[in-house]
Image: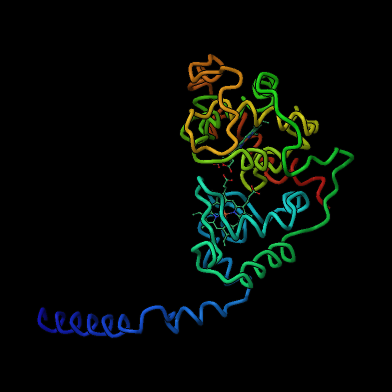
Amino acid sequence: MILRHSGLIAGACILLLATGCEPPGKPKQQEVNRRDIMDFGTLYRENCQGCHGPDGKNGPGRPLNDPLYLAIVPKAELQKVITNGRPGTAMPAWALSQGGPLTDKQVAALVDGIESHWAKPVNFNGAPVPSYYASATGDPDRGRKLFVKDCFACHGQGAAIGPVTDAAFLTLVDDQLLRTAIIQGRPDLGMPDFRMLNAGHPLTDQDISDLVAFLASKRPVTPNVQNANVNASGAAQSDPMVKGNEGSGNGPGSPRFQKNEGNKGGSSQRGVK
Ligand code: HEC
Ligand code: HEC
């Protein structure tokens, strides 16, 4: 038995060696074929699904299968972020020119596929549409007050959803992710979008910038963090606001969260036609 196994293994090794023996610099046939894949479903499944979720939602990363998100994000940004990734975050670069595995045509097929499969007209119900990019400098002090009012119930320190004021979390994401998250919410996981986040009313563009400035002010000072508005408010980690909520019952098991959980796709999608 053991001998036969080692024979198999030796055989496999020879095979591996043989495939490793192609002239350097020339892409292997298999790779060339992979570069011909243009089907959106296959490209998405093989490259994006692990982080952005099956069918573009319910993953650890941002949901891309969301009409509100796609109504707000510029197409050029989709192209840019897929091509280059977001340096300093977990979003890798995908284009061959940036060291990724995909051709420019495959990146374009992903952008077109995301839009043609997942974009739909959105009814904003008269709420002024915030811009995807921050257009104004945020005021972290005002953002802090908004956070206590509009976010603390779900995101206070100790809440099981995750304290988004945590230094560890903030070090891994850039300000655009924070802005995207506040505009889009997490329709798949029960976070309402900007239209409902101001105690059932829309957050304004300025509100969103202020909230981002507040969260960014909690990011530890590191030279490499992009556009970090670090400690503009002088807010330190010992801020009493993020303390003392431990076990306050705002976690997913609490009645309050279940109410919101039960609202999945409710408040956030009511306006989506
Ligand atoms: C290893 C995990 C991972 C994989 C795989 C991945 N992403 Fe991402 N992606 C992220 C993270 C994390 C962010 C947020 C980065 C930030 O801005 O902080 C992100 C951000 C994005 C954004 C921008 C969201 C916004 O703020 O507007 C788009 C679009 C996107 N990814 C598309 C894709 C596509 C398409 C693929 C497949 C080719 C892919 N991603 C694969 C982790 C991943
Ligand atoms: C009804 C509960 C609820 C409220 C209110 C709420 N959130 Fe969330 N939020 C969530 C859930 C659920 C998630 C997803 C957590 C996860 O990824 O496991 C989330 C995720 C986030 C994320 C992380 C996004 C990412 O992709 O990593 C940020 C940032 C965030 N919320 C900011 C805010 C801010 C700022 C407010 C107030 C304006 C707010 N949230 C209000 C429930 C809520």
Q: Above or below — where is 119 with respect to 206?
A: below
Residue closer to the observer: 147 or 31: 31
Write down the quadrant of residue 201 in the picture. top right
Instruction: Report x, y in % for residue 166.
Output: 50, 29
Q: Quadrant of residue 57?
A: bottom right
Residue sticking out furthest to the top: 240
Q: Is residue 215 left or right of residue 142?
A: left
Residue 158, above or below 191: above
Towards the viewer: 101 or 147: 101
Left or right for 11, reference 214: left
In-image side of 20 versus 208 (left or right): left
* Residue 140 coordinates in the image, percent (x, y): 65, 23
- Judged from this view, the residue extending furthest toward the right is 126
Depth order, front residue of 239/140: 140
- From the viewer's perspective, is residue 75 above or below residue 15? above
Instruction: State whether residue 120 is above or below residue 151.
Output: below
Report the residue at 14% width, 80% height from top: 6
Report the residue at 72% width, 32% height from top.
208
- At x 67%, y 39%, the residue is 179
Query: Percent x, y for residue 111?
Result: 68, 64
Exactly how many numbered labels are in the figure?
Answer: 0
Q: Position of residue 138 (x, y in %)?
A: 70, 27
Q: Name the residue rendered at 60%, 29% in the picture.
A: 229
Q: How is the image coloured?
A: rainbow
Based on the displayed image, in which of its 4 quarters is residue 207 positioned? top right
Image quadrant containing the N terminus: bottom left
